[in-house]
Image (cartoon, helix red, strand yellow):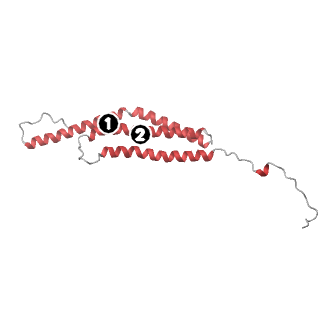
Amino acid sequence: LEEPGEYPENGTPEEQEEWNLSKQNWDAENSLRGLLFEMEEDKPVQLTISLSITLVGLIAVVRLVQKNPLGFKFGYAWLLLSTISQITTTLKYQALMSDLSEPTPSLPGQLDFATIQLVSNITGPLVCNSILLAVMIACAAYSEPQALEESGFHHQQTPIIALSEPPQI
C-alpha cells in the first residue's frame, strides 16, 4: 500500500471517498506493522519465560516419578508460574490488539467484543488451572505416607487357655 497523500479538497465526492478508504487502509496497515514489531521485540523475553516454566515443569515431573515429596512443590510452582504467565500475556496482547480494534465503534448498550474476549481468555486458564490444582492437592494428600495406628488387639497379649474338658453348664 502507498501512502494516500494529501486530501483532495477540490476533488469529486468519489475521489474524496476513495482517499478516505485508502487512508483507513493505510492506518490499519501501519497499526498492524506496529503490533507485529512490538510482538517481535518481545520474543526473547517470552522465550526466556517459557523455558523457565518448562524447566520447573520438567523438574516437577522427574521428582514426581521418583516419588520425591518435592515434586508436588515444584508442580505447584509450575502451575502458579504458568497461570501468571498466561494471564500477563493475555493482558499484554489485549492491550496491543485494542489499538487495532479502536476504529471499530461499538453500539450503545452492546457489550464490547474485546471485553468479552478478555474475560474469557482470563477465565479459561483460571478455571482449568484451578481444576488441575485440585487434582494435584488430592494426589499429594493421597500419596503421603499414612501412619497406621495399631489396633487394640495388638496392645495386649491375651493368654490362651487350653481346655481339656468341655465346660459344664
Across the whole image, how many numbered discs are drawn on residues?
Answer: 2
Q: Are marks 1 and 2 in contact (CB under 8 Å)?
A: no
Residue in front for this viewpoint, 163 or 142: 163
Disc 2 packing (10 Å; few <14; some 14–19; many ≥20)? some
The residue positioned 45% from the left and 33% from the top of the image is 48
- Residue 38, by quadrant, is top left
Which residue ends up furthest to the bottom in the rendered image? 169
Q: Position of residue 125 (x, y in %)?
A: 43, 45
Which residue ends up furthest to the front in the rendered image? 169
User: Left or right: where does residue 111 sit relative to residue 139?
Assistant: left
Q: Position of residue 72 (x, y in %)?
A: 57, 41
The residue positioned 21% from the left and 40% from the top of the image is 25
Disc 1 packing (10 Å; few <14; some 14–19; many ≥20)? few
Q: Amino acid at mark 2?
A: Ile
Dot 2 lies on which element?
A: helix
Q: Amino acid at mark 1?
A: Leu
The residue positioned 47% from the left and 39% from the top of the image is 82
The residue positioned 59% from the left and 44% from the top of the image is 140
User: Left or right: where does residue 62 sit relative to residue 18?
Assistant: right
Numbered label attached to residue 87: 2
- CA distance separating discs 1 and 2: 20 Å
Residue holding disc 1: 36
- Residue 4, by quadrant, is top left
Dot 1 lies on which element?
A: helix
User: Left or right: where does residue 63 sit relative to residue 125?
Assistant: right
Task: State the quadrant of the C terminus.
Answer: bottom right
